Image (cartoon, rainbow, N blue to C red):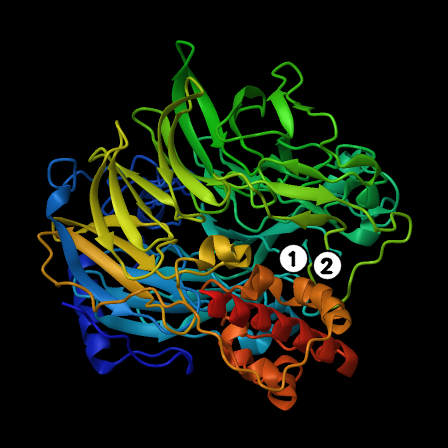
Amino acid sequence: MPVSGSAGRHGRPRLSALGLALCAALLFLAGCGGGDGGDGRAGVSGGAASGAAARLLDGSDGADWAAFGRTYGEQHYSPLDEVNRETVSRLGLAWSVDLPLGNSVTGPVAVDGVLYTATGYSVVRAFDAVTGRQLWEYDPEAPEAAGRKLRQGWGSRGIAWWNGKVYTGTQDGRLIAIDAKTGKPLWSQMTVAKDDVRFISGPPRVFDGKVIIGHGGADVGSIRGYVTAYDAETGKQLWRFWTVPGQPGVDDDETTRIAAESWSGEWWKYGGGGTVWNAITYDAELDTIYLGTGNGAPWNHRIRSEGKGDNLFLCSVVAIDAKTGKYKWHYQTTPAEAWDYNASMDMQVATLEIDGAPRKVLLQAPKNGFFYVIDRTNGKLISAEPFAKVTWASKIDLTTGRPVEMPGARYENGAQVELWPGPNGAHNWMPMSLDPRTGITYIPVLEMPGTFDDRGIAMKNWQRTPGNANDTGVNFGLDSDDPTAGTGALVAWDAKTQKEVWRVKIDSFWNGGTMATAGNLVFQGHADGSFNAYDSETGKRLWTFAAGSGVLGPPITYKVNGRQYITVLSGFGTSGALFGEKVARFGWQYRTQPRRILTFVLDGKAGPLPPAAPDHPEPVADPEYRPDPALAEKGAPIYGRRCLVCHGVDVKAAGLAPDLRASPVPQDAATFNEIVRNGALVPNGMPRYEELTDAEMAALRQFIRSQASKFRASAAKN
């Protein structure tokens, strides 16, 4: 049965009397939130048995989905098989919950019959996983606390669970532990400096009684990346690992001592980048943490490091000791990075038979389009092959482990070059999955090139635009005449042989993460509003569900009372919204698209969802508009640096924020000023830009209104 959304977003923890009673009953029956989880299953925690750790082992029974990737190894795989190729046609909606405005593209977790989500800006809720009844809600009120940090990021990608606690990161940089039974915060740690540009959007990970978190921000400020580990019970900081070096002679940390020789110039003035905003994997067998590091700050290697050096540990997989945070090894996927080809995509650990022998491997399909199989005991490359169209490099040299770059790929001498993939990558943060029985991974592939050049950029005296603005030191574009640009694919890729098994072409761009199951199924949501199940051996679509809006969040599955449930969150948004018409064409408007928690079970009888048709924006009249091309031209770069990520290329929005071409707000200077400079909509996630001058505001308004005028003209022709 459908369950309507509950109380509003403000008010800190909320627990209804009915919810408290229901939760208490669940705790009594299932042992939720107490001690080791109440089941006594063996695990690893400092060598001792721990029920909490047992749920997170890759070989666990699948009753719970207790981490972003279900288990430590981030495989996004479940051994449950009640829903399988033969039964999936009976899959029906068990319940749904409507969610408020804001981000709903997150990975939930489910433990002991309770489902936990973090939507919007890390508003955490708990639900009875069988009925969908809300048990509690906790709102950290992150937008109000974020200040300028609100100018980047769109909310939470996921949460973590450990020993009766739920962990969430916030836009303003807090890591918060919440009591899984009551929704009350137990501890909170500020993981970043209050006034820097760092923010959290990725899910925390837990391991061996610790919780680890990184941050984003390298595209908008001069920062160097790091990860921090805390005691999961108390919040005490245990260790911190810096991912790029600081200033030699000033910053005396391990990374500076190891990696500074791979940088040139005064890179520390630009921060360096290398943020760990998404990918963190724990190897319980080797007691090792693997970090997937981000791009350089700025992207342009000639600015960042005088065009010299590999710039470690940018765009790398870095292995560190899980107990001490000390460096073990690294493998760099994109040396001297210059295209935003970061390695922040999810990483799976497994033992696979390769060339007739079992190998302990780490798998990653990062942005640059090559699939990497790495020996996780020592960081040595085993194999690497392209899984998508790649034109920036011809291959990965297996002797050196380095890419063989194509001539001109580094846009030398101001020349513009089109490269596949573009800065969006061939695979972005939406996770792939691995079936450990077969060694086959299922990758949500993006098909889009990008253009790069640095014409008009003064290399010797480049200064970053202040105020948390997108400023990469590179001119890049996303236009292409290629008919496949702006499409996607679901690719089954054999990690053992580095061969494609099958490929399903998808008309939509920016599709959801995948989940593989022992029922020989692969689940994935699409930007077009469908949630789908595919035969994992053939790629044949066996089942589909019309969700009423794009489905980007990664699905999960779990068991309650002997029945297998599947949950996914619907709603379109995230940084994919910046791609304009490529994704806006599906008609998922910020205010009107439905956002829901959808839970399925065999023979589910909740019935169809309320009808929801795509809602395309309509032009609004602007009788006082007067063209001023010169003023609009001044407003274009302001829009590009401040507004594009949320409101889209060419002011064509795609669900993350309102379409300003169809809004009367830019027509009225006073209202526009109240929102943009005075922060009237900060609680809704619209940041404040108090430093913009009157002249800049006028130029920005003129640019937006000029795009709205083009929209009206186009609509009139049609």
Does the rendering let one see residue 64? no
Q: Is disc 1 placed on a helix, strand or loop?
A: loop
**Residue 204, horizontal then vertical, whole percent:** 48, 54
Q: Using the image, determine if residue 172 lies above or below residue 7.
A: above
**Amino acid tagged 2:** Gly
In this image, 438 relative to 338: left or right?
A: left
Q: Mark 2 touching mark 1, by CB under 8 A?
A: yes
- Towards the viewer: 397 or 479: 479
Q: Is disc 2 placed on a helix, strand or loop?
A: loop
Q: Which mark is residue 221?
A: 2
In this image, 99 relative to 172: left or right?
A: left
Quarter of the image where one finds residue 261: top right
Quarter of the image where one finds residue 2: bottom left
**Residue 131, horizontal then vertical, whole percent:** 17, 65
- Towards the viewer: 212 or 393: 393
| Label 1 sits on residue | 217
Q: In 3D space, how far apart are the residues under numbered discs 2 and 1 (Cα atoms)?
A: 6 Å
Q: Which mark is residue 447?
A: none
Does the rendering let one see residue 286? yes
- Towards the viewer: 49 or 263: 263
